[in-house]
Amino acid sequence: MAQVAFEEEIMRKIFSFLIATGLLLVPMVTRSGHITNVQSWSRQGRKFVAGCMTQAEVMDSLRQLSTSASTREQQGIVARLRDMASSSAECRKQVVTSLIAALKNANRDLVLDRPSFFLWYYGSKLLADLKAVEALDLLITNLDLHDGTPFPFNHRPALGAIIHIGEAAIPSLNAVLAQSTNDDTRKYVVFCLALIGGKIARNVLQQRLAAESNCCIRNCIEATLNAFRNKTLPNQITSKDRNKWYDAFMCDCDPAMRITIKTTSN
C-alpha cells in the first residue's frame, strides 16, 4: 500500500508539472468510452476535474435525476453537474441548455408525474445555483407549477429558483409585472420581488404601485412595501411581518377586481 501511495504521489507531481508548463494537452476517455475535453488537476491537487461531458452523458444524467429512487443519488448527480458546469463557460452552457430543453419537454403535472417533479425539483435548484438568467423566461412561464401541497406559494420549484437567482432576475420580473396580462403570474412576480428584496426590488414595486389596476396585486405590493419599512432589516421581509404579509397574497386575483387608475396630465 505504501508503494502504491508513493507512486500516486509521484504521478500527481508529474501531472501538476505538465499542466503548469502547458505540456499536457491530451484527451481522456470516460468510463462510457466517450472522449471528453482535456482534463486537469484541481488546484488542491487531489483529484481530476473532468472536462465537459458529451451531450449523451448530460442527458443520461438528467434521466437518472428524474427516475432515481435514491435522494442521495439524485443529490450526487446534481453535484456532479454543478461541478462540471462550474469548470468552464462551455460546460456551463451545455448543462444549462440541456436542462432548459429537458424541463420544456417535461410533463407539467408534477402531482401525478413523479419523474417530472424530480426533474423540476432538482433541475430548478441547479439552474438557480448556476445563476442561469437565460432560464428566467422558462421559470417565469412555469411559476404556477407545484407538487400538490395546499399552500399556494410553497413547493413551487420555478418560484424558488427565481428567488434564489436573486437581483439578477429583477429586470425580467419587472418586464413581466408591467406587461403580462396574467394576474396570477404577476402576483407570483410580486412574491418573488418581495423575497429577493433590496432597494432595486423596492423601487420596482414602488414604480408599479401607481399604475397597478388590480386590487389584489395592489394589496400585495402595499403589504410588501409596508413590510420593507421595518428597522431591523430594511427592504426585506422579516419573520415578525411574514404572517401579515402572507395574508395579502390570499386574495382572489381575477379581472373583476380591477379598478380605475386616475392619471393627471401636465
Image (cartoon, grey):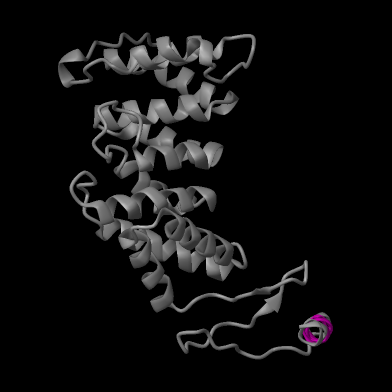
Name the quarter where the N terminus is drawn.
bottom right
Magenta includes 16? yes
Locate residue 257: give its quadrant. top left
Point out residue 258 in the picture as x, y percentages from the top left corner.
22, 15
Residue occupying image coordinates x 39% and y 57%: 70
* Residue reaching furthest to the front: 1
Question: Looking at the image, which residue sits at the far left?
Answer: 256
Image spot of residue 40 (x, y percent): 70, 78
Q: From what the image shows, is residue 174 above or below residue 260?
A: below
Identify whether 229 is placed above or below 59. above
Please indicate whether residue 60 sits to the left or right of residue 238 in the image: left
Q: Find residue 101 and report its horizontal and vertical position in percent.
A: 33, 62
The answer to whether residue 266 is seen in the rendering is: no
Asked if residue 17 lies in the magenta stretch, the reply is: yes
**x 33%, y 58%: residue:** 69
Considering the image in quadrants, where does the C terminus appear? Answer: top left
> Which range of residues does the magenta coloring cover?
7-18
Tell me what residue is drawn at x 38 percent, y 31 percent. 189
